[in-house]
Amino acid sequence: MGGVALVAWMLPADRVRFAIALERARLAADDPRIVPMRLASRDDARLLERAAAALARMLPRARTYVERLECASALNELAARAGGAGAKRGEAIASMLAGDAPAHAVAALADAHAPATNGAAFWNDVAAIRGATGRDDESIAALAALDRALMQEPRRAEALFNRAVLVERLGLTPLARDAWRTYLDVDAQSSWANEARARLAAQRASDEEAWSGVKGTFDRLPPDALRALAQRFPEHTRKFAEAVSLTSWAAAMAGGNAAAARASLAQARVAGEWLQRERGESLLAETVAALDRAPRDTRVIGGLLAYRAGRLAYRDGDLAGAERALRASEEQLARAKNPMARYARFYVASVLFDESRGADAAAMLEAMLAEERSAPGHRALTARILYELALCDAVAGHWSDSLAHAQESVALHRALGERGFEAAAEAVVSEDYDLIAQPELARRHGLAALRESCAFGDFGRARVVLAALSRTELRGGRWEWARALIRLEAQLAPPNPSLDSEMFLRDAAAAGHLSDANAASRALLRARTTALRIVDGAARAKLLADVDAVEGTLALRDDPRRAVARLSSAIAFQQRAERPIVLPQLFLARGRAQSALGALDAARVDFDDGIRALEQQRSGVHDAELRPGIFGDGAELFDEAVALALRRGDAAAAFAYVERGRARTVFEEIEGERATALPPLADIRAQLEPSTALVEYCALRDRLAIFVVTRERLVLRTMPVSRAELMRAADAFVESLASRPNSGDPQTSGARLHQWLVAPIASDLAGASTLVTIAGDALQRVPFAALYDAATRVYLVERYTLTSAPSAAVYAVALDRANARDASAPRNALVFANPAAPVDRYPNLAPLENAEIEARLVARRYPKADVLTRGNATAERFLGVAPAYAIVHYAGHAVVRPNEPGSSALICAATPQTGGDLTARQIGRMHFDATRVVVLAACGTLRGRDIAIEGVTSLSHAFLVAGVPEIVGTLWDVADDEVAPLMRALHAQLARGASAPEALRAAQLAALRAASTRDPRRWAAFAAIGAAPSARQLDHRDLAADGEARGRTPVAGAAVHVQPQPAHAM
């Protein structure tokens, strides 16, 4: 770029200055191939589009992210010169070009469009900004915004163009064609119309469309041509030969047409030989060989004809007729020892599943899978069995098994080149991730399945995938996104009563949550009337039960008595049908209805039943990384149970519910097979030191519950602050500390939180010198040390030694481990500093020279210390030697992957065997039996994915699981040059035998005493997690409160004038 930013929007004085730049750009002002999405047509919008076009043209030449930011910055600067709405729109486009998160750009657009922030132009521009990111979630959000724009102005050209772009991006070829034609009906003349025509012409035919043009010649093709066809269409060829050629042979034999029978069998033989040779798939070849051996066996002829009849009945929704025909087929073919009996049996199991007889289907499929694994040539059938078994597992709540079976099915179909079936199995992977509350992974796999289904031409499957994607958004409370996907689904495929009824139900649920009562009622009526038209009794009963469930949920607010009746009917059906997957949500809804009616005992039973159902489903997830999502998805159940216990004045029950859901995965991974049950409150209290108070927070929708646990008692306080308000305040506090100046005053925002979090329990903390905070997801990133008491002008760290834990149960385990370790001053330490990050994977991670210098100073504190830096600081070395040291210090880069917490990593030097990542998954499998403290002086090591109930999963949790009782980590990114003084003070205390919380407090108080580091931005990022054992060999002069140094004396448990609500007032 040569440092020249090319732009086209400027004031007259700028024209000379940028003339050379404009010439080099050769800018086409309205080139739609440059601007990815169209903004609303306004005067300033046209100028901004030209600017965006110029910058976008330069972006491909930008070699680094910094150069891309320079392009965006240039536009932002020039936009600001114009002022007003134009400046805000320029700011929005700059964010779009820089690849920023769209929230800031959308806020700028809202200012630019004010006061018309609900108009079609605004929603179109929101869609343009979101859609330009190219991210899957933002593309769905953009579709929802465009729906709002087009509802107001159905012929708005920019919105129609943008919608066509997004539909095309999703791979929905038939809908994309329609969308481009609709746009051209509105605009047939502009350069954008030329682009639309080009895109319309570029829409490719699907595999199914291409196959339709050649399948009529299948029976007449010579062998070489048939082999070429199989190479191009392996899935179509196999399915056609098995389902059509073989049954045509049987029909011809039954009709006495030997010539036609020979022709059909010859084609099946060529296809079978090709599949066996090229794909390792032998079932068709084995079947042809069996027919050659017994060409006139009436059992085979009758069995194949029954197979065809059963498949046709299944296709038409006649499940009872399909089951009869397929069982007859299986019986005849099995007696004749024909391999096609295996397929007949598979389809019997499929019918059983569709008849809501999942347990019977699963038993049959498990037996088949064991048999097929001993016949390695039946790869396609094995893959189909795995797919169907994954469906059975999912409905039964065995999600780890379902995921494993679906993933194996994907791999087998991919190896066979069968992209249609691969897409179907990928869709199950998506739904499994959705059911275990992993929406990002669900969306990623679901959209991959959608694109593959459309490319293959299976638009019925594509519709099913869209339905699953809309369920993902419904479960996440993204109602507008769900409705956008439902609208696509309605356009995609011909009517199907079963699919239509379920689609109307989802639309009703979304409309109800959006307070569109009329739309919800219409959709419910359509769902019920459509379900009543279904011929098959089992399928009809299932859908009517689902209608009851949605109707009961939507009736909660206005008619709780009717809600109870409908929901009871739905629950009874799901229990009879052994479909536990939806029971937690149904019990939640009925419990709410019972509570609204004042039937508190019945409500408690429902919430308990829902939690038990949730726990049973959770036990079906073997992967510890995925298990937290189950409780995260059931957060409302725990919240309702806690709220009801508070309403009944039962503090112990409320505390038990909070603990029952919080950080169960960490506790289970730590305790292993011993984790049969959570420790009772009495046991936790008995383990606490006399001077320790454990404070557990539970943020409910309308209030904050605070539990104070000491050796003597459990105290409950509540504050009338909503969860949303609390989270906003917490975010503001963290932002004021994690960002540079001008982001707010930390003392002001910290004082506000202190009034809510600490002041209400001040009298309950009398006599305590150590606080263990259990924050929950709403407060997980809050640095409690920096909470500020405005009345006495002291920080919380000046009063208490602080640590945190994911749950009280986890704290108790960590305390046991800490007390079992050698309490004398540590004899050795391992220091990992400035590892050489792999440049190919992390080109933007700069070396941490200061960390390397500091590491050697830290090492001098210990009698024996080993320092590994740069290329020597490998993951292999860490895994091999770290557990032998009492103190482990890591000073390097960390990568936090919130959506895949097991892949979050400490970055180490690469070796030929490893890529440089020391992942949380690897750390959790280590055994730190001798290590007392791990210090993670890296960015965001206490940060992770917020799981509403289980809490934040982070790198620090991995060390807890691995056996480390005390950890010091960071709540946000820190600069290595600012860490040094704090780390020196921390290790000075650790080397004397202090616990991690004591040592960190000493370091933070030392920072408070020094003028250069007094600002909490310099010390508040570090926090302790894990145990706070009794004081060891610590020089308590180093813990003198900062208030003494400044002429004031902080008073532990000082009284403050805040009136918390007592438990009995709830």
Image: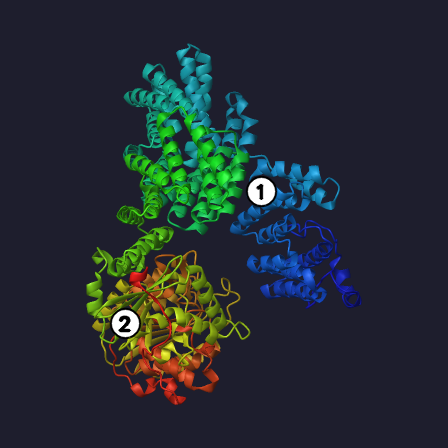
Determine if residue 663 is in view.
yes
| Amino acid type for the residue under numbered disc 2 | Ala
Relative to residue 552, is residue 271 depicted above or below? above
Of 734 and 600, nearer the camera is 600
Is 413 placed left or right of 359 in the picture?
Answer: right
Q: Nearer the viewer, residue 170 or 496?
A: 496
Q: Dot 2: what SS?
A: strand
Nearer to us in this view, 1006 or 839:
1006
What's under tag 1, amino acid-wise?
Answer: Val
Write down the residue under mark 1. 167
Q: Which quarter of the figure is the N terminus placed in?
A: bottom right
> Extreme top residue here?
256
**Would residue 383 appear left or right of 207 to someone viewing this image?**
left
Q: Which residue is mark 2?
A: 693
Question: Residue at 36% of width from left, 52% of height from top?
Answer: 636
Judge the density around disc 1: few (<14), some (14-19), many (≥20) Cα neighbours within 10 Å.
many
The quarter of the displayed image where residue 188 is located:
top right
Task: Compute the Cα span from label 2 to label 1.
Answer: 56 Å
Task: Give residue 887's quadrant in the image.
Answer: bottom left
Residue 695 horizontal/vertical position (percent): 31, 68
Q: Secondary structure at mark 1?
A: helix
Residue 467 visible: no
